Structure formats: structure tokens, C-alpha cells
Amino acid sequence: MKKVLFLLVCFFLTIAQAVAQGKTITGIVTDASTQETLPSVAVVVKGVSGQGAVTDLNGKFTLKNVRPGATLVFSYMGYKKQEVAVGSQTVINVALTPEAKELTSVVVTALGIKRSQKALSYNVQEIKNDALTTVKDANFMNSLNGKVAGVNIQRSSAGVGGGTRVVMRGNKSIAGNNNVLYVVDGVPIGNQADQAGDGTSFGPGRTSSEGISNFNPEDIESISVLTGPSAAALYGASAANGVILINTKKGAAGRFRATFSTSAETAHPFILPRFQNIYGAKPNRSESWGEKLATPSTHNVKDFFQTGTTFNNAFSFSTGTDKNQTYFSASALNSKGIVPNNAYHRYNA
């Protein structure tokens, strides 16, 4: 009898030990959308410290001594975390769902290198395309007025198509050029709108257009404004006043995309000087005062101005594969200022 009792005790202890040890769980982790296996996925037993595994290059994992009723947690960067309860099965295959998250803000720096905004030692501000195309201007730089801290944008008095003076953090030279350097997709471009003396830009004479105003704002993806002196180190002395980096749109892999936009704007003088035309000097008199005129003058200042109009039409399409991408755009801008004989026409392709 004692021998039978001893054998029963040993039998139950063996069963208890087997239950306590649990079982071995194997499986494969895949991507729910592409069905591809995922390596380096963390698989841990919930609530148990130190018990876990990592999937291999084929997405396979093995977990030993998993007790029935335990919960396995599958986690992988860029995918939603998933929990699976362990029942009687020994094979558990899991398909993780991708999860889109913005990890950090990325900006384009010198030479077109993309860096995390937090990792930069200088001030950089980024403007998206929406800020340029919501209210369109013949010179898209005028659309940035008031949108960038520490940047003063001055529109010239030449009317539509005139140059724009951009100064960052105040003037740094009394007689020199204080305008910024423009860099388009890593290539610096000349911009002479702030150099006086030839009668074609800011200063004596008339103000002509500038190179940067020839760009179609619909082709611009984003603009990075570098105001710190160390940010312009790669561009030399010409960038001492700051740099405006323009990143243009490019083709993308995927289906064919086409966009068309059109806009129309009008401009009117907001405030005009008011003059009285009832009292004045008679003909052949040098005084600017006198009695009431029999025939008041009808020369109104407002008759000089006209209604300004701007019509902008743009079309673009993009397509491509993983190896080749294509982007094409065409635009036409026709603008007429509030001053007679002031017109600006721009055609891009």
C-alpha cells in the first residue's frame, strides 16, 4: 500500500512539473499587407520578465516553457502591437498591420541633405507649398511675407513682376548687398535685385525682375529658410546674409497623377490722397490759393489708376516606377498692375 501511494505521489508531481514547465510555441510573423516575413520582431510573454524571443531572417520564432493561458505580445517598429492568447495550440502565426507615424520633423539643409530639425545647431524654418499657392503672387517670394520669423520681405514699387528684397535679421552692410542667397535643389542661383548703380534694380532708376521670380510656385515642394551664420558655411561669403533653400517637386513611383489649377485676382488702390478742387489760383497766377473757381478741376488722382488683374493657370503630371520617375509641369501667368503700362507675363514648362 505504501508503495502504491508513493508511486501516485511521484506521478502527480511529474504532471505538476510538466504543467509548470509549459510548452514550446513556434510560429511565423508576416506583414499583413505584403505577406512578407518580418525579421527582428520582439515576441515576449506578457507579465513575465525575461521570457521572450526575436524572429529570425525568415520571420520564425520559438518560445519555450509557455504556460497555457499566457499572452504573447508581438511588437515591431512601424507596426501596430498585437497580443495573442495561448490556448491549446503550439503554432501561432501572426500578421502585423503597418502603422504610419511621424517620428520627427525632417528638413532639407545644405547640398540637399535631409536632417532632423532637432539635430541642427542653427535656426531653420520650413514652409510647405500650401503657403505659396493659397494666395498667389506674380513673385512667389511676396507670399512668404509674415510667415517666416526674423525675415523682412520688401516688395519693390515697380509693380507686378518687380524684384523683392529679402533681409534676414536686419541689414549687415551699409553699402553692400544684404539680400539672401537662393539655392534650388542644391544649385546656387544669381539674384541681383539688391545691387544698385545700373538703373535696373533696387536703387537709382527702375527696378527689373529677378531670377527667383521666374519660378512657378506650383513646382515648389518646400522651402527651408536658414538664418544662422553657420548654416551657410558650405556656400561661402555669398551666403553670409542667409540662405533660402528651394526643394522642387519630383516624380513619384505609383499611378499616374495629374493636377490642374487656375486662379484670378484683382487689385485696387486701397488709400488715395484726397485733394480739394473747388478753390485755387486763377490761370497765370503763381499762388496755390485763391477764391472759388467757376469751373472746378476734374483731374482726379484715382483716374490715373486702373484695376489690376492676375490670371494664373498651371498643369502638371507625374508618374514612374521604382527606378524611373517623371514630373512635367506647364504654367502661364498674365498680370496687369494698377499703373498703366505695367504688365508681367510668365510662361513656364
Image: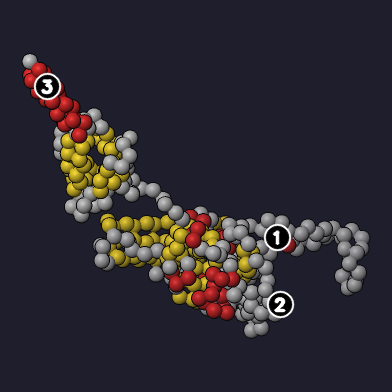
Q: How crowded is mark 1: few (under 14 residues within 10 Å), some or many (20 or more)?
A: few
Disc 1 or 3, which lies upstream in sequence?
3
Task: Tell me the quadrant of the picture where the C terminus can be found.
Answer: bottom left
Residue at 36% x, 64% y: name it.
250
Give the residue at mark 1.
302
Q: Decide which of tag 2 and tag 3 comes sooner along the chain.
A: 3
Disc 1 on helix, strand or loop?
helix
Indicate the position of residue 114 as horizontal and vertical percent values. Answer: 43, 64
Q: Give whichever of 48, 236 is nearer the camera.
A: 48
Q: Which residue is drawn at 87% across and 70% down?
A: 283
**Identity of the amino acid at label 1?**
Lys
Foreground residue among 290 and 65: 65
Callout 3: SS: helix
Q: Residue 6 carries which label?
A: 3
Rate crowding at label 3 as few (under 14), some (14 to 19) or many (20 or more) other CA atoms within 10 Å.
Answer: few
Work out which quarter of the rendered image holds the N terminus and state it.
top left
Residue 21 appears in view = yes
Q: How far apart are marks 1 and 3 (CA)?
A: 116 Å
Residue 44 in the image, given as x and y percentages of width and height: 28, 41
Are the residues at dot 2 and dot 3 in contact (C-beta closer than 8 Å)? no
Quarter of the figure with residue 72: top left
Q: Name the foreground residue: 284 vs 150.
A: 150
The spot of residue 295 in percent (x, y) is 83, 60
Counting from the top left corner in percent of width and height, residue 60 is at 18, 48
Number of marks: 3
> What amino acid is labelled 2 in the image?
Ile
Q: Quadrant of residue 176?
A: bottom right
Rendered residue at 50%/76% (across/down): 234
